[in-house]
Image (tube, rainbow, N blue to C red):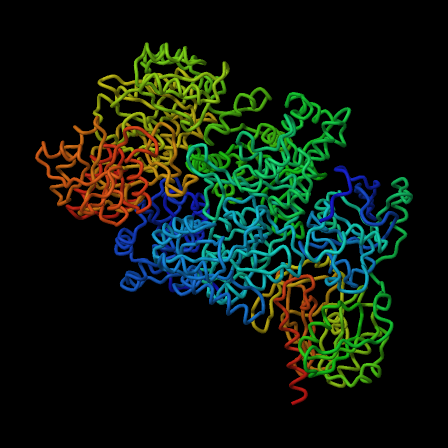
Amino acid sequence: MPKRTDIQSVLVIGSGPIVIGQAAEFDYSGTQACRVLKSEGLRVILVNSNPATIMTDPEIADATYVEPITPEFVEKIIAKERPDALLPTLGGQTALNTAISMHEQGVLEKYGVELIGANVEAINKGEDRDLFKEVVEEVRKKIGHGESARSVICHSMDDVLKGVETLGGYPVVVRPSFTMGGAGSGFAHDEEELRRIAGQGLTLSPTTEVLLEESILGWKEYELELMRDKNDNVVVVCSIENFDPMGVHTGDSITVAPAMTLTDREYQVLRDVGIAIIREVGVDTGGCNIQFAVNPEDGRVIVIEMNPRVSRSSALASKATGFPIAKIAAKLAVGYTLDEIPNDITEKTPASFEPTLDYVVVKAPRFAFEKFPSADSTLTTTMKSVGEAMAIGRNFTEALQKALRSLEKKGSQFAFTGPVGDKAALLEEAVRPTDGRINTVMQAIRAGATQEEVFASTKIDPWFVDQLFLIKEIADELAEAEKLDPELLAHAKRHGFSDAQIAEIRGLREDVVREVRHALGVRPVYKTVDTCAAEFAAKTPYFYSSYDEETEVAQRTKPAVIILGSGPNRIGQGIEFDYSCVHASFALSDAGYETVMVNCNPETVSTDYDTSDRLYFEPLTLEDVLEIVHAEQQAGPLAGVVVQLGGQTPLGLSQALKDNGVPVVGTSPEAIHAAEDRGAFGRVLAEAGLPAPKHGTATTFAEAKTIADEIGYPVLVRPSYVLGGRGMEIVYDEARLSSYIEESTEISPDRPVLVDRFLDDAIEIDVDALYDGEELYLGGVMEHIEEAGIHSGDSACALPPITLGGFDIKRLRASTEGIAKGVGVRGLINIQFAMAGDILYVLEANPRASRTVPFTSKATAVPLAKAAARISLGATIAELREEGLLPKTGDGGTLPMDAPISVKEAVMPWSRFRDIHGRGVDTVLGPEMRSTGEVMGIDSVFGTAYAKSQAGAYGPLPTKGRAFISVANRDKRSMIFPARELVSHGFELMATSGTAEVLKRNGINATVVRKQSEGEGPNGEKTIVQLIHEGQVDLIVNTPFGTGGRLDGYEIRTAAVARSVPCLTTVQALAAAVQGIDALNTGGVGVRSLQEHADHLTAARD
Amino acid sequence: MTTSTRGARTQAAPAVLVLEDGRIFRGRSYGAVGETFGEAVFSTGMTGYQETLTDPSYHKQVVVMTAPHVGNTGVNDEDPESGRIWVSGYVVRDPARVPSNWRAKRSLDEELANQGVVGISGVDTRALTRHLRERGAMRVGIFSGDAVADDAALLARVQEAPQMKGANLSAEVATKETYVVPAIGTKKFTVAAVDLGIKGMTPHRMAERGIEVHVLPATATVEDVYAVNPDGVFFSNGPGDPATADHAVSVMQGVLERRTPLFGICFGNQILGRALGFGTYKLKYGHRGINQPVQDRTTGKVEVTAHNHGFAVDAPLDKVSETPYGRAEVSHVCLNDNVVEGLQLLDQPAFSVQYHPEAAAGPHDAAYLFDRFVSLMEAERA
C-alpha cells in the first residue's frame, strides 16, 4: 500500500533554538524528514526559528519560515500556506507542544489540517503521567509484564506532601508533566528538597501537574527505540543500556548500544512490553522511545516513560545502527509501511527488520559546569549536559575510550600516572554521580578498590566494572613491559588506548609512540556500520576504526576532500559549525570531489550517512585524523583536508597535520597562527595601520597591575588559549584584579593572562568575510544590541547594522581586507570590532567559519560556507560570482535599502542549573559565553524583527501590563526614553526607590516596590520577588551592578527565570524591546518565508 | 560477583581457525582446548547465546557469533534449549571475564570447557563473517593446545572432515525414548511431536496452550505416532540435510493421508515440502539470527523472527501448487531474500514454517502460529 494521495502539502515544525535537552538531533531528524517529504513530491512548509540549522536552508523545504514557534505565528503560517497536514513528531517537545496547543485552540480544525505521525490521543497517552500509567497497567493485564513505579499524581503542594506518605517516605522522585528533557524533575530526600523541586515542577508543567514516584535509584536503565506502521508492523530499532544506573538522566549518562547485560529472555520481555505499549498508546505511523528500569536483584521491570516522537535517543539509535529513524518516520507518516521502505544501507532488504550490531557504541555526555561555577554539578533526572560524543568500537573498551577522548576535554580520558589517591575517599566521591565520575572510579581502581567496592559505591553493573578493571590491567601491563612489542601494542589499541595515553604511561612523546607503532605495523582498519552484522553487503561507506584484521575502505578514483567536523556540541562550539561542514560537503561534492566527513557528534547532520560520500565516525584527535588520512591516501588521490569550518577543534590540529605531511587546504597553519597569536596579530594590525585596544600580557599580579595602571580601568582580563571567553572578566579595580589573578589556576609563564583595555559604551560589530588572496567578499556586518563586553555569542545582533552608516561600512571593509590579507586568509574570516567614540578598534580575528556564518548566510541569502570550501580548494571569488554561488555584484556590505532586517538572539540555559542549595544561578550576561543556542527574527523593520527574535527565544514580548524597572546608576540616563515609551504603550511601571526617583524627576510615574532585602512591608506590601512569583509582573528590566547571590538583582533575575517573565539585563536590550513592543502594538506582524525574502533581495540586487 | 581470575591479556593458549578454502584466523583458545571440525556458520543474534549453543539444529556446526561480546550474562539453568551444548565449535571476539546476571550460575567459559566444546576467541569475526557470506558456509577446524600443527597439515585435516550437504543427523540429536511434556493447566489436546532435534521451548509453547506433548524419537513410525492417539502431529526442527530425511518424509505422508492437523517448524517445514513433492536446496550461507523480516502472505503483516536454517524449500512463490494432498501455497516469505519461510495446504489442516515461532532465543512475534495449530485441532474436533 503506497503513500497517501490525499496529502499534497505538509507543515513540519522544527525544535527552535538549541537548549539543553533539545539540541542538534532535531535538525538531523527534521532535515531527513523534509528531504523525504520533498522527494515524495509533497510541498514542504517548515517553521523553525533557529537559523543555525540545515533544515532551514532554503533548498531543504519549499517554504521555510524562520519565525517563532508559537501557536500565534504557526497559525499565521497555516493561514497563509493552508497545508493539508502537520507533522509534529520530528521537532522535539517544542513541536509536539505547539501542535497540541493548536489542536486545543481549534486552529487545526479551522484550517482543515490533519495531524500526521501521531494523533492527539496517542500524544496525550504517551505524555500524560496518569494516562500513561493506565497504558502500562493495560499492558500488564494483556501480557503479564511491565509495571509502573508506584506513584501519585499531584496538582498542589498539599497533594505532594500527602503523596510522600502514600509512597512510604523519602526519597521520592518528582517529575513534572509535559516538560522536555526532564526539566524540573529531581530526587527529594527530605521535605525541604521536596517543596523546592515540586514547587518548581508545578510551575514548569503546563498542566500544573507533577508525579511523585517510589525511588528506583541504582537499578539498571534501558531504552528501546521502536517504530510502528499503519499495518501494525512493529520493529525495535535499537536497545540502549545506561552505564550509569537509574538516577541520572539518560541524556547525562554514558550509554551503550546494544544492551550488554541482558539475557535473551529478559530482553524479549522488554521488547514485548515495548511493542504492547506502542500499540496501546496508539502511535500508528512513527517512532517512539521507551525507558525501562530493571532491578538487578530479581529482574523486576518498571516502565519509566515513553516519548511518542523522534527523540535525542532516536538520533543516537539511528547513528548507532544505520537505521534512519526520522527518515522512516516521515515515510510512515505519509502512508508507507515498513516493508515497502528499502534499507538504505543494503538497498536490497526492507526496513521491516531489526538492526543487529557487530560492534559496540558508547555515547558520553559533554557538560559545561565550568561556565556555571555556582551550579550544582550532581547529575540528577534533569538533564544538564550540553552535548555528546559517540564512538564505535569492536568492543566496549575500545568504544568507551574513543568516546572519552572524543569529548575533547581536559581530564576526560583515563589517566594512569600521577599520585594514587585515597581509596576510601575516591569510593566515597564516586557515590555522587557527576561529570567525570567514571574517571573517579578509575582512580579508585588504581587506588586498590575491588570490583565489589566499586559496585557498592556506584551500582554500575559488574560487567561494566570489570571492563574498567580490564582497562586498568592493560595500563599496568603497558607500564611494566620491558618494551612495546607489537603484541602488547595491538592489545592496548584493541582496548582503545590512544597513542597519547600509551605515551604518558611509558613516559614517551605521543609522536614517538606513533612512530614505533607504525614501524611495527600496528594500524587500525575501518569497518562498516551496516545494520546487519555483515549478513548482507553494505552500499553505504559509514566507517569506524578498529584494531582488527580486515579493512573495508574501498578504492576510489575521484580526488577526495576530508572535512573535519567540530565534535561534541559545547557552549561556544555548537551546531553552527556543523552547518558549515555540511555545506562544504555539499559544495565540494557538486564541484566534483569525493567528500569524506570526520566527526563524532551523533546529533548532527554531518554524521548522517547521506551527507557525504564517506563518513568516518571517529574522534577528532590528531592520532585518529592521521589514521583516516592514511587510509584515504591508500584508497585514492587526496586533494586536501579542510580544517577551517569545524570551529576551534579542527583548527587546532592544523599545524600538526601539516607537520605530518597532510595537505591542509585553505588558510594555512601559519596564517592561523598569525591571527591567533597575540604578538603576530599585533604585527598584522600595525602593518595595516589598525588600532586595537591597549593591552599587555602578565604572569603575575605585579605585571598585571602595571599594565592596568598604564591603560586604565576597567580592563578585560582572560587566560590565553581559551574558547568562548572562558574565564574572561571585566575588572573595574585593583582589588578585583588581585583576586582574579589569585583565583586563576590556569596562569603560568607559558600561559599568561591577557589584560586589555575595556571599551566601555562601545558598539560591538561582527564581520564575516571571504578572502581568496585577491578579492574580499564582505559576507555580512552585524551590529550587536548589547554593548562591547558581553560575549558576542551571548549578544543579540542585527544585520544589516541598524545604526552604522556608509562611511562606517567602508572603514569596516578596509580593515577587514587589511587583516585578511595580512593574515593570509583563504576562505572565511570573522573579525570582531568595537566602535568607541569614533575609533574602530579590532578586538580579535578568527581565520575560520564563525558561529554567525549560518545567520549571515540566511540573512543575506548567500551560502558563505559553500563559497569558503570552494575557495579553500582554489576557486576565486570572481569565479564563484560567475558560477552564481555568490551574487554577480555587491556583497553583504552593500545590501539594498529595503533588504530585510535580521536579528539574532542568544538563548541561555539558566533554568537548567541550580546551586547546591537549590537556588537558580544568576542570569547576568558577561564576557564569558554561556548561551546554548540562538534564534533569528527576520522582518522588514528592526522593531518587528527584534520582537520576533524575543518571541522565538523566550516567548512573546508583552504588549501591555506591568513593567518593573531597576537599573544600575550608570544606566539611569539611558533608561528614561524607553521607560517613557513603555508608559505610552500603556504599561504600568514599577520600580525600586532609586530608579523610581529618577523616573519621577523626569515626569514618569512609577509605583515604588520593595526590594527583596527590605522584606515585606508593615502593611503586607510585597517585595518585587514575591510579586514576580505571584505573576504580577509582565516585563522586567534589571541591569546588574556587581555579581553574587547577595544582591537583589540576583533574586529578581532568578525569579524571572523561574516564572518565565521576560527579563532584560541591558538598557540596549530595553531600547530594542521598546521598538519591538511598538511594532507589535501597531499591529500587522506578518510571516514571510526565506524564499520570499531571497526573491525580494535578489530582485533588489539586480 | 566473581572476581576476575585472569590477567588482562588473555592467558589462554593460542588457537587457530582454518577454513576449508585455506583462510586462517588466529586467536586464543576459548572453552575446551583441543580440536574440532564442523560447518562454519555465523549467527547474528545479539542475545541468546545459551539458547543457540544448546539448539540441536547446530549439531556439527561451528558457530561464529557476530556480536562481539559473548558470555556477559553467564550461564543459568533455565535458558538451555536441550540437555547439552550441541555446537561443535564456538567462535567469539570478546568473551566476558565476569558474568553479570542475577540468574547466572557460572561463566560461559567454564560451561564450554565442562562440556568439552572447543572454541576460539579474539578473531576478527566480522572478516570471517564477510568471508562466509561471500564464499558460502564451508568446513572449518579449530585447533588449540597440542592440536596445533603447521597450517598445511591443519588445512588437510579440515578438508577431510564430512560435508553438511548429504548429512543425516536427526537421529544423533533426537531423544531415544518417548517422553511426555504435560499440559499447563487443563489439558485440551494431545500432540505427537516427532523429535528431529527439538528445542525445549517448542513443547513448552504447546503446553502453555493446554497441549500434552508426546515427544517421539526421530525413528518413530506412523504407527508410533498414532499410538498416542494425537489430535495433532508436530515435526520439529533439527540438523542436517533434509534431502536425507526419507524416513521422516514417509511418516509425514502417513499423517497427511489421515488428514490429522499437522504443524512443522524448520526441518519440519522442509519435510512437509518434500512430502508435498517440492525440492530442497542448500542456501549459500543460511539464515541464522533473530531479526529476520518474514511476511505472512495471508495478512500482509511482517513479523520479526528467529531463524536457524541452512537449507530451504524450493516452492513457487507466485502460484498455488497442486500436490497429492490438494492445493498448497507458500504462506510465509523472508523479505530479505524471498526464501520460502512457510507452507500451507488449502484443502486440509497442515502448515509449517521454516523459522522459529517458539523463539528461544528471539522475538515472540510469531507465537500466534501455535494458536493457529490449536485452531486447526479445534476445528477438526468440532
Q: Residue furthest bottom?
A: B382
- Residue A646 to residue A209: above or below: above
Give the image location of residue A365, x and y in percent: 52, 40
Is residue A559 visible in this depiction of the protein? no
Quarter assignment of residue A27: top left
The residue located at (48%, 42%) in the rendering is A604
Residue placed most toward the observer, A587 or A499: A499
Tell me: B20 left or right of A522: right
Q: Position of residue B348 (x, y in %)?
A: 68, 83
- Residue lying at the far left in this picture: please name it: A1003
Residue A784: horizontal and vertical position, in percent? 28, 30
Q: Nearer the viewer, residue B41 or A127?
A: A127
Q: Quadrant of the C terminus of chain A?
A: top left
Hey, which quadrant is residue A101 in on the image? bottom left
Residue B27 figure quarter = top right
Residue A78 in the image: above or below residue A121: above
Using the image as rendered, state which of residue B347 and residue A154 is in the foreground: A154
Q: Is residue A346 left or right of residue B33?
A: left
